[in-house]
Image (spheres, rainbow, N blue to C red):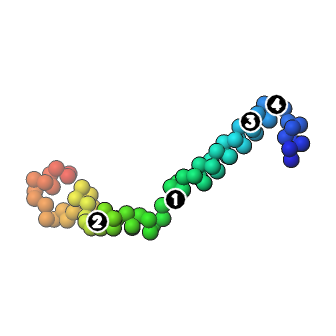
C-alpha cells in the first residue's frame, strides 16, 4: 500500500500523512486517558446514588400545562391560559 501512496500527488500524500498522524495521536490519547468512554446507564445511576438524588423523584413538572388539572385552577388563572 505504501507504494500506492507514494505514487499519489504530493498534496494527497501530505493529506494522508496528516490524517495518519491525527489517528496516531487519538490512539495515544485514548490509551493514556481512559476517561473518554461513553457513559452507560449503570454509570449514570451510580452518579445519582453518589450525589444522593433519586431519578424522577418528582415526576410532576409544574410548568407543564399537560400535567396540571385545569379544573382545579381558579377562574383568574384559567384566564391567563386562554
Q: Is mark 3 on a helix, strand or loop?
A: helix
**Label 1 vs label 4: CA separation?**
38 Å
Q: Mark 1 points at which residue?
A: 38
**x and y percentages locating residue 25 in the rendered image:** 64, 45
Chain-order first, disc 1 or disc 4: 4
Q: Is mark 1 on a helix, strand or loop?
A: loop
* Residue drawn at 71 percent across, 37 percent down: 18
Q: How many marks?
A: 4
Q: Can residue 35 be seen in this view?
A: yes
In this view, 79 is above or below 3: below
**Label 1 vs label 3: CA separation?**
30 Å
Mark 1 near mark 2, Cβ–Cβ under 8 Å? no
**x and y percentages locating residue 31 in the rendered image:** 60, 54
| Mark 3 Cα-neighbour bin, 10 Å: few <14, some 14–19, many ≥20 | few
Q: Which residue, as the protein is rendered here, is positioned at the far top?
A: 10
Horizontal relation, residue 42 to residue 52: left or right: right
Q: Mark 2 points at which residue?
A: 52
Horizontal relation, residue 72 to residue 33: left or right: left
Chain-order first, disc 2 or disc 3: 3
Q: Mark 4 points at which residue?
A: 10
Q: Name the residue under label 3.
A: 15
Amino acid at each position: 500500500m505504501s507504494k500506492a501512496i507514494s505514487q499519489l500527488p504530493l498534496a494527497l500524500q501530505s493529506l494522508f500523512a496528516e490524517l495518519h498522524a491525527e489517528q496516531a495521536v487519538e490512539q495515544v490519547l485514548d490509551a493514556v486517558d481512559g476517561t473518554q468512554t461513553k457513559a452507560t446507564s449503570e454509570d449514570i445511576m451510580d452518579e445519582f446514588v453518589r450525589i444522593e438524588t433519586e431519578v424522577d423523584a418528582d415526576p410532576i413538572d409544574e410548568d407543564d400545562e399537560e400535567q396540571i388539572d385545569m379544573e382545579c385552577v381558579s377562574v383568574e388563572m384559567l384566564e391567563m391560559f386562554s
